[in-house]
Image (cartoon, rainbow, N blue to C red):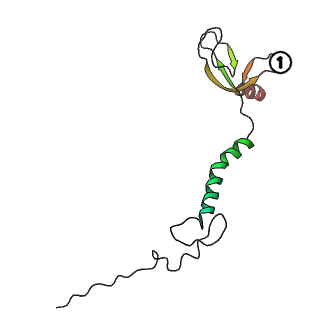
Amino acid sequence: MTMTTPIPIGDGTRDDSDGHHRRRCPICDSSIPSTRARFCSGACRMRAHRRRHSQPDRLAAALPAAWPIVYECSQCEQRYLAVRRCPDCNLFARRLGPGGLCSHCDEPLLLAELFDSAAT
C-alpha cells in the first residue's frame, strides 16, 4: 500500500502571480513592486505621511477665525466676552456659546440670540 500526498491546488491570489502590475502608487502612479506594499518607495511613503499630517494645518488656516465665547457668572448673571472668571465674584462663569459684542450697547450677545432676533 503506497500513500500519495495530495497536491495542493491554488488559485494564485496569494502568490503574486499576475496581480502586481495592476496596483499603482497613490502618490506617483507607478507600479508597486510588492503585494504587501502600499507605496512604490520610501520617498512616496514619507510624502504621503507629510500630506496626511499637514492637512489639518491647511484646513485651520483656511477656516475663518473662531468666534469668541460668551460666559455668564452664575451669581451676578453678568456676561463676559472671552473672560472665564467673574472679576467681581471671583467665580468661574459658565459657558453660553459663541458670540460677540452688540454694536449698539457693547454687551456680549450670543450668535443664537442674534439669529433669533433677525428671524423675527
Compared with residue 51, is residue 91 higher up or lower down, i.e. above or below? above
Q: Please report the residue visible at 74 percent of the width from the left and 29 percent of the height from the top.
A: 115
The residue drawn where x is 37% and y is 82% is: 9
Tell which of 39 and 92 is nearer to you.
39
Q: Quadrant of residue 101?
A: top right
Instruction: Give the structural element (helix, strand or loop) at label 1.
Output: loop
Q: Is residue 33 left or right of residue 54?
A: left
Residue at far left of view: 1
Bin the neighbour count of mark 1 within 10 Å (Cα to Cα): few under 14, some 14-19, many 20 and up: few
Range of residues picked out in magenta: 25-33
When the figure is inspected, residue 72 is found, relative to residue 50, above or below; the finding is above
User: Which residue position is annotated with label 1?
Assistant: 104
Pick the quarter of the image with the C terminus: top right
Residue sitting farthest toward the bottom: 1
Q: Quadrant of residue 104?
A: top right
Where residue 55 appears, x then y in whole percent? 67, 49
Quarter occupied by the N terminus: bottom left
Report the number of numbered marks. 1
Q: Nearer the viewer, residue 65 or 95?
A: 65
Position of 2 with respect to 18 (left or right) is left
Q: Residue at x 66, y 45 (%)?
A: 56
Q: In this rendering, would 59 be left or right of 75?
A: right
**Residue depicted at 61% across the width and 55% down the height:** 49
Q: Main secondary structure of the magenta part?
A: loop
Q: Is residue 28 magenta?
A: yes
Please state which amino acid type lies under the numbered disc 1. Answer: His
Task: Please tell me whether residue 106 is drawn above or below residue 37 in the rendered image.
Answer: above
